Image (cartoon, rainbow, N blue to C red):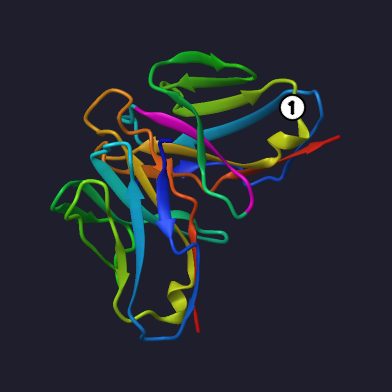
Amino acid sequence: QKEVEQNSGPLSVPEGAIASLNCTYSDRGSQSFFWYRQYSGKSPELIMSIYSNGDKEDGRFTAQLNKASQYVSLLIRDSQPSDSATYLCAVNGDSNYQLIWGAGTKLIIKP
Amino acid sequence: EAQVTQNPRYLITVTGKKLTVTCSQNMNHEYMSWYRQDPGLGLRQIYYSMNVEVTDKGDVPEGYKVSRKEKRNFPLILESPSPNQTSLYFCASSLSPGLAGGNEQYFGPGTRLTVT
């Protein structure tokens, strides 16, 4: 059973600090990795995708992928209260037709 | 505006009364999928479709049916709903999982279903 694991949190971070979210996955063959943000009662929103080892930056967000260690992380710089949400990690499964989802990490940014 | 739409957004029904939740996307995406989300269980895939007339079961297909007669629409059918199908349902679509970057999934706003 392929798995994606995330710490459920909540992770509490002061406003303006860096929030670091982590995700590990079990399938060494996975090629596509995604971070989604989900506000309570709302739908998941894609914020980052990463396909190769290393860092990918988009504004205040940086995704980091390490395939050898099978983890992917999301850094949020200059955290804002509006970043408070649940962050879902998703990884492609046996085929690209399915994504395997982590249960999510709840992030709280304290003003 | 590129989007995935779902209707209804909220539905309260009784056990055994057939219902359909519609999903439509205007992005010409090949792939569409239905998920349910329950507290503590995360997102679980119900069914997915790779293209018109091509569907397959996800992780929790029991009690659900789908069809894909047109590329833009992917309705979810509960022929005899039961209380354990009370959940938050999401439809999602992606361009084409076979292409680089093509399996980035975009979600509809969700349908909150309560079965009494």
Residue placed most toward the observer, B43 or B99: B99
Name the quadrant containing residue A109: top right
Toward the front, the furthest residue is: B1
Residue at screen point 45% across, 85% down: B14
In the visual, does B21 lie left or right of B29? Answer: right
When the figure is inspected, residue A20 is found, relative to residue A95, above or below; the finding is above
Residue A26 visible (yes or no): no
SS state under label 1: loop
Bounds of the magenta span? A32-40
Name the quadrant containing residue B105: top left
**Spot occupied by residue B100 in the image (x, y as percentages of width and height):** 28, 23
In the visual, does A67 lie left or right of B67? Answer: right
Magenta stretch holds residue A3: no
When the figure is inspected, residue A85 is found, relative to residue B34, above or below; the finding is above
**Spot occupied by residue A50 in the image (x, y as percentages of width and height):** 43, 22
Type of residue at label 1?
A: Ser
Q: Which residue is mark 1?
A: A79
In the visual, does B3 lie left or right of A98? Answer: right
Residue at screen point 61% across, 17% down: A59
**Spot occupied by residue B89 in the image (x, y as percentages of width and height):** 45, 60
In the visual, does A61 lie left or right of B51? Answer: right
Residue B14 visible (yes or no): yes
Residue at screen point 52% across, 39% down: A45
